[in-house]
Image: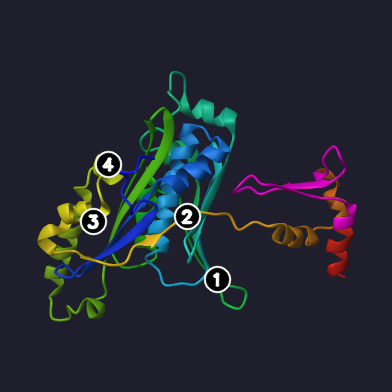
Amino acid sequence: MASSEDPSSDAALPFQLDALGVRGRLVRLGASLDAIIERHGYPRAVARPLAEAMVLCAALATSLKYDGIFTLQISGDGPIRLLVTDLTTDGALRGYAQFDSWKLAVALGAGNNGEAPEGYVPKLFGRGRLAFTVDQGQHTQRYQGVVPLEGATLADCAHTYFRQSEQLPTGIKIAARRDTVDGAGHWRAAALMVQQMPEFDAGRIDIDREQREDDWRKSVILMASATESEMLDPKLPAQTLLHRLFHAEQARLFARRPFVARCRCSRQRLARVLRSIKREELDDLRDTSGRVAVKCEFCSTEYAYDDRDLDRIYASAA
């Protein structure tokens, strides 16, 4: 995109509102979305939910302290059966969607321009669930939070999660769209997130409950005043937007956390997957040349294994 684009694109900019006892982050994605979404050629009605899920994943992941992989997964019985996106602590972001083209066309209806409708979650995902997983490696216990897929938007569904999990009060606003720049399509997505801090961490033990509630409501109102065009404007620096929203509260900014579209697949990783399957069951995966062909759902890279490769894979499992 243009060189005038905000240098904090594809990054999270954490901030803190000390006067209100609130912390938050502004997350923006641009080039990473193009790299992931355009590679798959998803219909617009699938691409937008994926873009929103990816920026939500980044907002939630960067609010946690972990060393590993944060995964957001949405599954349902609607046209979009599955949507998965994950982020590593070093900023590697990826995502993919599975959908039924015929069901999608029926759900969108005649005369639709191919866009995901407002409040699309019930129509495109149907009944399902939203799951968050933190995986810090084989020697640690995985954390997973699962809630029913309730709400018109992904932000609504995230709010349902925070209410049911008894986490700290949290507010989230998400925006995503595809623009045409110099004849080429580009995706942008943004998320604003505010979260009430624990009283001790905020240094506000002496503040009464009513004042804390008033301060929390004020932070949500200020966050909600951000317009979609502001959140997605590549020429509006993230720092400038946060100053516009919270200038009276003197938002304290922290080091930004950059993201890049990068898949973690490899021949070695997929070989371990194949090793977990009985060899005779691999015949359905063979291509016209007789090799077992496996495609990564995230990046669409295809890996092929001939019989000598399979001999080595299964010999190492013996």
Quadrant for the N terminus in the image: top left
Mark 1 highlights which residue? 142
Cα separation, mark 4 vs mark 3, equals 16 Å
Mark 2 highlights which residue? 260
Q: Nearer the viewer, residue 81 or 32?
A: 32
Provide the residue span drawn in magenta: 285-309
Q: In the figure, is residue 184 to the left or right of 239?
A: right
| Outermost residue to the front | 3
Cα separation, mark 3 vs mark 2, equals 20 Å
Magenta-colored stretch includes residue 203: no
Q: Earlier in the sequence, mark 4 or mark 2?
A: 4
Q: Name the spot of residue 9 as percent of width and height, x first.
A: 36, 51
Q: Name the spot of residue 17 as percent of width and height, x first.
A: 19, 66
Cα separation, mark 4 vs mark 2, equals 23 Å
Q: Secondary structure at mark 4?
A: helix
Q: Which amino acid does the dot numbered 4 rest on?
A: Glu
Q: Earlier in the sequence, mark 1 or mark 2?
A: 1
* Residue 95 image label: none
Cα separation, mark 1 vs mark 4, equals 35 Å
Q: Secondary structure at mark 2?
A: strand
Number of marks in picture:
4
Asked whether the residues under the numbered discs 1 and 3 touch, taking CB atoms below 8 Å apart as contact, a structural biologist would say no
Mark 4 highlights which residue? 228
Q: Which is closer to the viewer, label 1 or label 4?
A: 4
Q: Secondary structure at mark 1?
A: loop
Q: Which is closer to the viewer, label 1 or label 2?
A: 2
* Residue 239 image label: 3
